[in-house]
């Protein structure tokens, strides 16, 4: 029953809409002064957290389709992955614009001087070829094996993202959320190690 | 709504009704937030807890506390005062949670009477000072200070209080008392954040004796013409406007006079980030971000450029002489 539902063409549209809702809320909130006393900080923080959440969703597809026996889930992985990139772009845009006023010299100095920004920017740079090669033509062009190898970089991106989040919180001793996301991503990555070694193909 | 002494001209941005007309701003904002959350379909469990908090918030109508405009040099900036709503709902008070919105939501459990401040250490007159006596030590003054948080945002707040030096003079510190240490209440029964280990409790801060005796160093008992709301550090708190906000200890229960420099809580937690002096200084970067600019809360619109941070938060003329010859990069 679930499989039939997942297989319907409309399901993709529903998931797309749900994934876009947070962006719509943030946009509405920005224009209606509904994001609290420090809206710029709220936007930068929320978009970062959204990118991280979608990263978790994307990496959860493969374990879920194996454990729950739902191969149809694979249809949504590319879309969720692109939403990671989308929210990462908005996150970077908010930082560059609202925090740094598009002063490119200051931004370059920040990237060079501040470890957590360097790590975050690196994660974004690594995400870009993944987003660029997410389309069918790119998969065909690269060939399945090379495409697979390139997209394994997402594991490194996951690590960089947690490091970025941790370092951003470092001076505040407020690590509850960092630990939570770190644990989720660790579980999702470790499943792959376990699956490769022990599961029958 | 009536205007009071804080409604200076057209551009103060601050109009505050007389106390009997007040819907506590926190309650007003909570109602709006709840309606928005209902609209977004996520009210759920927050309704029950919100309802009980609203009942408590309604019971506590703020008491007026006013003062004469201060004659201390630099004590009243002409800049636009931050809205009462922002000043009372965007707070760092980790004893009540680490989110900015938590102190306003959780601090109703703080008990501010009875209250006394213990005076300890190298003084001729140690002992306990009751809050009711402290309120009468010196005439209340109204001071409009800039407040700059180390995180990179700032506000302009009209405090009510008097110089800390009025208290210090009365307790007569000895000649070898070079530093003053302040301790905040840390009661796990009434302060949920104290049950967490985000900081080593109680919260401790300190000043050098000349900083503590400086006329600008304020012991505040009120803001916006009323007694301090709980989330802003009721019933009395320090305000040191030329230092980062975390130096301005809230809800003070002890003042101790020492010979050696005390270790402050944030300095203990992250010494590479937070020093003892923590003077506002655009030339000394925080390890994770630059301190050259700041975001003034409530300043016209999301896309307004951040403003330049001023040396000593704009109080250079009044305080710079205390740090003459000191390497401020080393003593951050």
Image: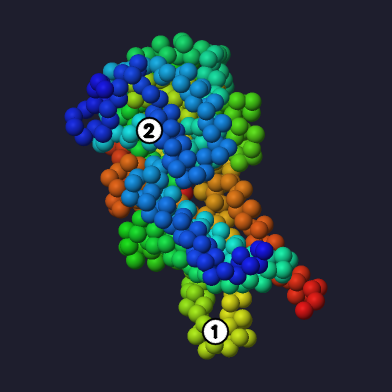
Q: Is residue B285 above or below residue B114?
A: below
Q: Residue at x 35, y 16 (%)?
A: B20
Q: CA distance from mark 1 to mark 2?
A: 53 Å
Residue under the point 61% across and 76% down: A152
In the displayed structure, does residue A71 sit left or right of residue A115?
A: right
- Same chain for labels 1 and 2? Say yes or no: no
In depth, the one of B19 and B210 nearer the eye is B19
Q: Which residue is rendered at x = 58% and y = 83% of the image?
A: A147
Residue position for label 1: A139
> B252 or A54, which is in the foreground?
A54
Mark 2 chain:
B
Report crowding for label 1: few under 14, some 14 to 19, many 20 or more residues within 10 A (C-alpha). some
Percent coordinates x, y for residue B315 in the rendering: 31, 37
Q: Secondary structure at mark 2?
A: helix
**Are there few (<14), some (14-19), or many (20+) residues within 10 Å of tag 2?**
some
Q: Which residue is mark 2?
A: B85
Residue positioned most to the left: B9
Q: Indicate left or right for A62 with A111 as reference.
A: right
* Residue A157 is at least partly visible in this image: no
Residue A60 is situated, as x and y percent measured from the top left of the image, at 64, 64
Q: Is residue B194 left or right of residue B208?
A: right
Q: Chain of mark 1?
A: A
Residue B135, visible in the rendered structure: yes
Residue B79 lies, in percent from the top left, at: 25, 36
In the rendered image, which quarter is residue A191 located in? bottom right
**Rendered-image quadrant of the N terminus of chain B:** top left
């Amino acid at each position: 029953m679930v499989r039939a539902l997942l297989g319907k063409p409309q399901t993709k549209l529903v998931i797309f809409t749900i994934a876009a809702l947070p962006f719509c809320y943030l946009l509405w909130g920005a224009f209606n002064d509904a994001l609290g006393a420090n809206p710029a900080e709220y936007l930068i923080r929320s978009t970062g957290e959204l990118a991280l959440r979608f990263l978790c969703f994307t990496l959860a597809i493969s374990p879920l389709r194996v454990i729950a026996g739902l191969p149809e889930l694979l249809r949504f992985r590319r879309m969720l992955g692109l939403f990671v990139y989308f929210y990462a772009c908005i996150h970077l845009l908010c930082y560059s614009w609202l925090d740094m006023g598009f002063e490119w010299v200051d931004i370059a100095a920040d990237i060079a001087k501040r470890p957590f920004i360097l790590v975050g920017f690196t994660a974004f740079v690594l995400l870009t070829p993944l987003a660029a090669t997410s389309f069918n033509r790119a998969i065909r062009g690269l060939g399945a094996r090379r495409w697979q190898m390139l997209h394994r970089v997402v594991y490194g991106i996951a690590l960089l993202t947690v490091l970025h989040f941790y370092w951003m919180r470092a001076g505040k001793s407020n690590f509850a959320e960092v630990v939570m996301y770190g644990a989720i991503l660790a579980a999702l990555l470790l499943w792959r190690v376990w699956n490769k070694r022990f599961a029958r193909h | 709504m009536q205007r009071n002494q804080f409604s200076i001209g057209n551009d103060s941005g601050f109009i505050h009704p007389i106390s009997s007309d007040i819907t506590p701003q926190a309650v007003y904002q909570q109602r709006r937030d709840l309606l928005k959350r209902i609209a977004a379909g996520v009210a759920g469990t927050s309704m029950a807890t919100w309802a009980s908090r609203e009942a408590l918030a309604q019971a506590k109508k703020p008491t007026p506390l006013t003062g004469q405009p201060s004659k201390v040099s630099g004590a009243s900036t002409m800049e636009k005062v931050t809205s009462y709503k922002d000043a009372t709902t965007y707070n760092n008070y980790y004893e009540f949670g680490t989110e900015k919105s938590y102190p306003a939501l959780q601090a109703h459990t703080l008990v501010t009477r009875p209250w006394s401040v213990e005076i300890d250490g190298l003084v001729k007159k140690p002992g306990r000072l009751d809050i009711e006596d402290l309120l009468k030590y010196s005439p209340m003054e109204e001071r409009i200070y800039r407040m700059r948080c180390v995180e990179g945002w700032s506000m302009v707040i009209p405090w009510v209080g008097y110089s800390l030096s009025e208290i210090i003079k009365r307790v007569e510190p000895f000649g070898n008392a070079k530093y003053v240490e302040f301790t905040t209440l840390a009661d796990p029964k009434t302060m949920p954040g104290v049950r967490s280990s985000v900081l080593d409790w109680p919260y401790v801060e300190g000043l050098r004796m000349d900083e503590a005796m400086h006329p600008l160093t304020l012991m505040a008992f009120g803001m916006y013409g009323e007694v301090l709301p709980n989330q802003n550090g009721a019933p009395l708190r320090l305000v040191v406007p030329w230092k980062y906000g975390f130096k301005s200890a809230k809800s003070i229960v002890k003042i101790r006079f020492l010979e050696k420099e005390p270790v402050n809580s944030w300095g203990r937690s992250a010494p590479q980030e937070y020093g003892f002096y923590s003077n506002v200084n655009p030339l000394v970067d925080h390890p994770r971000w630059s301190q050259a600019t700041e975001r003034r809360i409530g300043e016209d619109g999301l896309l307004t450029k951040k403003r330049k941070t001023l040396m000593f938060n704009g109080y250079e003329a009044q305080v710079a002489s205390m740090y003459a010859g000191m390497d401020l990069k080393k003593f951050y």
